[in-house]
Amino acid sequence: MRIVDNPTRCSRVGIVSSTQFPMGNRDYAAPEPERTPDDDVRPPLFRRAEYDRRLKAVREQMEYQGLSALIVTDPANIFYLTGYDAWSFYTPQLLFVADEGEMLLHLREMDANGAFRTAWLPPEQIVGYPERYVHRPHLHPFDWIAFSLRRRGLIARATRGAVGLEMDAHFFSPKGFRSLLNALPEWKLVDCFELVNWVRAVKSEAEIQYMRTAARVTTAAMQAAIDTIGVGVPQNMVAAQIARAQAEGDGEAWGDFPAIVPMLPTGTSADTPHLTWSDRVLTEGDAVVVELAGAHRRYHVPLARTVMLGEPSDDLLRLEDAVAEGLQVVLDTAAEGVPVRELAHAWNWSLARHGLEKDSRLGYSVGIGYPPDWGERTISIRTEDETVLAENMTFHVICGMWMTGFGYEVSESVRITRSGAETFTSFPRSLIRK
């Protein structure tokens, strides 16, 4: 069998090269990036200096962990380092990051051919594996990628230390791991423990601006949900209007596809999070929990509210008061330099005053998201987390109380500042009555 290792077959016309990134003291993209000759080639989201800083931070962490190379398979991490954005993650893709030299992005050939339309990488750093490796029982794309790396002379260089894998990434399969293990016996493969995810935890000012834009999409989507929810309305119609608003957005704040579909636990099923929808018709007395996110340029701002059709029960009113007080205490506690566990302690003490407790975590870090999750899989707001808050960390704080036969949820996405916490949206935090 003949292996052909060719860079992406595409015209260089309109490709964004590293020399096209504006430089300067500011490390984020200009408000209106210069259009490329091809309008279907997306301008870089950030200045080259920011991408360089991200790669430098990743390599510094690699050195700390004793890694000579890193295999990146999480689509959010690939996007973070290269800007590559497409619905191609259902087939294996791999970004090879050595401790020095250029990164190499490996994709299915049909996707690699057009990767220059979103990624800032030059075409010689984008490699397509043949179609015959897709969905084969006895072959895996990583077999081909491993041999391609060997032909480039990159395997021996990576034996100077361990090679990190994203062992808990959603799209890194056991079969993919076995392929690398068998094809590269000289490598010491180890878990990198979400290395790139942790680098992503503190956002740049440009990322914060993208999240503020995403928040406008969030606001439009939540308003669409509230406006649509009513007695006699099927759940799927509520979901349809949310989806419309998530894509339509708000003016120039257009909506990207969210990493998670809208969740609509209703009535007695509101005691269970993460339920979606059916054709169930909303009735008088239903409490409808709405959890959704607006997304823009892959940056997510989640939000949850509870809508009440009719008169709420005393138990639900009790939860409303307890959650409102607890959430405010958490927001008042949050600031740069505060340990994450202190937010959880503040929440737990506030709930205890109402005779309540919540076993699940209070929230998690957010930012870039791809299905099936908008969380970063790093920091969790709970008493065991030793992380110290830093400016421009961003979190989804979920004050969800799932009882027996009913539930109540209010959440906020927040940015940590030097002196407190900034909420990305401004919806009322009370039970929404209709």
Image (cartoon, rainbow, N blue to C red):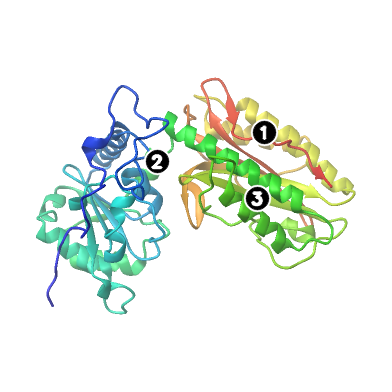
Figure check: 349 above or below 302: above
Q: In this view, does 136 lie above or below 346?
A: below
Q: Residue 178: x, y in percent? A: 28, 68
Determine the image quadrant of residue 179: bottom left
Report the side of 134 relative to 424 (left or right): left
Residue 235 position in % (x across, y down): 73, 61
Give the residue at mark 2. 198
In the drawing, what numbered circle is on residue 426? 1
Compute the Cα span from label 3 to label 1: 15 Å
Comparing 15 with 361, the one in front is: 15
Q: Earlier in the sequence, mark 2 or mark 3?
A: 2
Q: Is there a contact, CB below 8 Å, between mark 1 and mark 2? A: no
- Name the kind of residue labelled 1 in the image: Ser
Q: Could you tell me the amino acid type at mark 2? A: Trp
Q: Tell me the amino acid under the disc marked 3.
A: Glu
Foreground tag (3 vs 1): 1
Residue where numbered disc 3 is placed: 291
Disc on the earlier residue, 3 or 1: 3
Who's the residue at 57% across and 34% down the image?
414
Q: Nearer the viewer, residue 209 or 71?
A: 209
